[in-house]
Structures are given as C-alpha cells and as structure tokens.
C-alpha cells in the first residue's frame, strides 16, 4: 500500500466514523467493502443543465464524482448547490485530468418541481439527473447512510474514495490528492475561484467572466505573459504589476466553438517572480 493510499484510507475512516455512528470498526468494514466496487451509472438517466436536457457522456473521464440524494428528507436542502458549484470548479482547473461530475436526485413526489426550480434559481450549471424511479440506487448496492452516497470513481467506475467533498474540507483534500497527485494536491493559488461553469450557450456566443487574483506571496508580482489554450479564449489583467496583499482583476472572454458538446478552455497567467502559472478555466456546454 502506498503512503498516499494509506493516508487516504485513514482520513476517510476517521471522518466517516465521526459523521456516522462513531463506531470506527463498523465504518472501517463498510468503507473497506466499498473501495474497488464498480458503480453502475444507468444509461437511461436523463441529465439536465438547469431545465435543458443534455447529451452527457462521462465514459472517457479519468475520474467521476457522483453524489446521490434520496427522498428521505428535504431534497432541495440536501443538494447544497452553492457548495457543490465551488467544489466542482476547484477540480476542473487541471486540464491534464478529465473530471466529470453528476448529481443524481431521487426527489419525493411533491419535491420534483422544487428541484427543477432551485436548479434554475441558483443558476446551477452542472449536470443533474432527476431519477424519479430510483434507478441508480436499485442498480447499486450502497449502504443506507447518506455519508456513503458521494464517491470518487476512477476511469473504470470503481470507487477510490467515499465522502462528500462539498461539505467536508478534509474529504475535499483527499479527492484533490487523488485527482491531482500527492505532490500537486495542495499547490497554493492566487485565485480562490479558479474556474467557472457557464452552463449552456449557443455556437458563436460570447461570454465574459471576471476573476480576482490576490497576491499572497509577500513579493511584488509582474505579468510575464498570458497564454490561452486556444484562440477562442483571451484575457486581460489589471493592474499588470500586483503589490503584496493587493488584488488584480482578470477579465476572461470566450467565444463558443462551432463544435457542440462539452467545452473546457483555460488561460495561464505567468509571472516573472513565480515559477508556476495561475490557471483560470471556463467550462460548459455548447448547444447544436
């Protein structure tokens, strides 16, 4: 067992045991049974971005974050959409790793319209499947405790971590270390929100997003170069010299490709005084 895997297992055991019954040995046995389990994601699930159906294909992703919300309590309360938006975007920034996300919701009958409404009201621009028939949970032998209903899957849909990264920073750190690698899991960033989901746009549409970079390095930073991932995305930064403990604003403009489907583009900001660039990512879907 590698040092990283051992650390991950110990961390998850301690967090899950506290959040569930507190019975360490029992939770250890449950977690041990889940690691390596293949999760079935039914093809019949219909995925939405807010109110619009999308053709969502996660099969080629390096990792998949799946969270399942059943009808036991108030469904919309447990969705925690703002927290999930921030968490998902934090994992999207690494262009070298393809991370897919899906929230699967089985609402109570009278909550169905509320779920769709909250997706629109909170502008949640990530895929959600409303599974009214409970197909997902019927296809997978998961424990009844909700602590085990969020998981990180590898490329073969096998569980490599369990727990909700949107509500627990220690679990979020575990996910990050698995996705980005042990050495790169905690690289400090100047931009607290380094990615943004723009939802669904049409071909040729232009979107503009603003990001703040806070200089927490203790030295003055001077822009060396801004490098886009392709010609459809560009950025300007002001000011181009950022004093310690000061903030710069990055304005990112993206023009949608002519190719429909999922789109992810980034810009890298290089500083003279900083070895690693700051990466800002935009991602979403282009309609036909």
Image: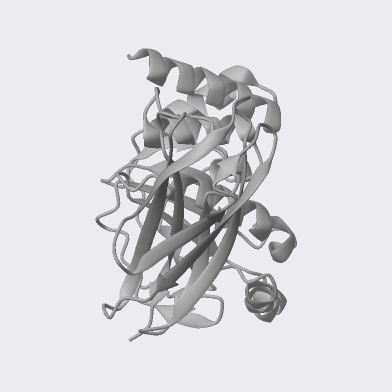
Residue 254 quadrant = bottom left
Horizontal and vertical percent for residue 145? Answer: 62, 43
Horizontal and vertical percent for residue 142? Answer: 48, 46
Q: Nearer the viewer, residue 170 or 32?
A: 170
Left/right of residue 117 with respect to residue 205 in the rendered view: right
Residue 20, compared with residue 91, is above or below; it is above
Q: Nearer the viewer, residue 121 or 211?
A: 211
Residue shown at 54%/73% (left/top)? 132
Residue 187, compared with residue 68, is above or below; it is above
| Residue 145 visible in this rendered orientation of the protein | no
Left/right of residue 186 with respect to residue 118 in the rendered view: left
Residue 188, compared with residue 212, is above or below; it is above
Q: How is the image coloured?
A: one colour
Residue shown at 38%/13% (left/top)? 3
Left/right of residue 83 with respect to residue 63 in the rendered view: right
How many numbered circles are shown? 0
Q: Nearer the viewer, residue 217 or 147?
A: 217
Residue 119 quadrant = bottom right
Identify the image quadrant of the N terminus.
Answer: top left
Horizontal and vertical percent for residue 105? Answer: 56, 64
Residue shown at 60%/26% (left/top)? 219
Residue 6, compared with residue 255, is above or below; it is above
| Residue 256 visible in this rendered orientation of the protein | yes
Identify the image quadrant of the C terminus.
Answer: bottom left
Residue 185 quadrant = top left
């Amino acid at each position: 067992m590698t040092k990283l895997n051992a650390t991950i297992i110990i961390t998850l055991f301690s967090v899950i045991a506290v959040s569930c019954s507190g019975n360490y040995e029992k939770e250890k046995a449950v977690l041990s049974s889940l690691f390596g389990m293949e999760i079935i994601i039914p093809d019949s699930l219909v995925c939405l971005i807010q109110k619009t159906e999308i053709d969502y294909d996660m099969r080629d992703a390096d990792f998949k974050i799946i969270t399942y919300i059943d009808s036991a309590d108030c469904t919309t309360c447990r969705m925690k959409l703002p927290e999930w938006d921030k968490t998902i975007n934090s994992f999207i920034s690494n262009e070298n790793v393809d991370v897919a996300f899906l929230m699967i919701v089985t609402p109570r009958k009278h909550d169905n319209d509320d779920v769709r409404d909250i997706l629109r009201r909170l502008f949640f621009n990530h895929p959600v499947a409303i599974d009214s028939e409970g197909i997902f949970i019927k296809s997978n032998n998961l424990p009844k405790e909700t602590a085990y209903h969020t998981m990180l899957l590898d490329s073969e849909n096998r569980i490599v971590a369990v727990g909700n990264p949107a509500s627990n920073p220690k679990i979020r750190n575990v996910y990050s270390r698995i996705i980005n690698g042990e050495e790169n899991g905690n690289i400090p960033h100047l931009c607290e929100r380094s990615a943004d989901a723009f939802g669904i746009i049409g071909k040729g549409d232009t979107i503009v997003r603003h990001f703040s970079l806070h200089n927490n390095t203790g030295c003055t930073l001077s822009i060396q170069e801004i490098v886009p991932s392709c010609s459809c995305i560009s950025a300007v930064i002001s000011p181009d010299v950022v004093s310690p403990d000061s903030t710069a604003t990055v304005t990112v403009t993206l023009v949608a490709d002519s190719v429909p489907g999922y789109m992810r583009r980034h810009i890298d900001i290089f500083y003279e005084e900083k070895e690693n660039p700051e990466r800002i990512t935009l991602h979403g879907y282009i309609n036909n």
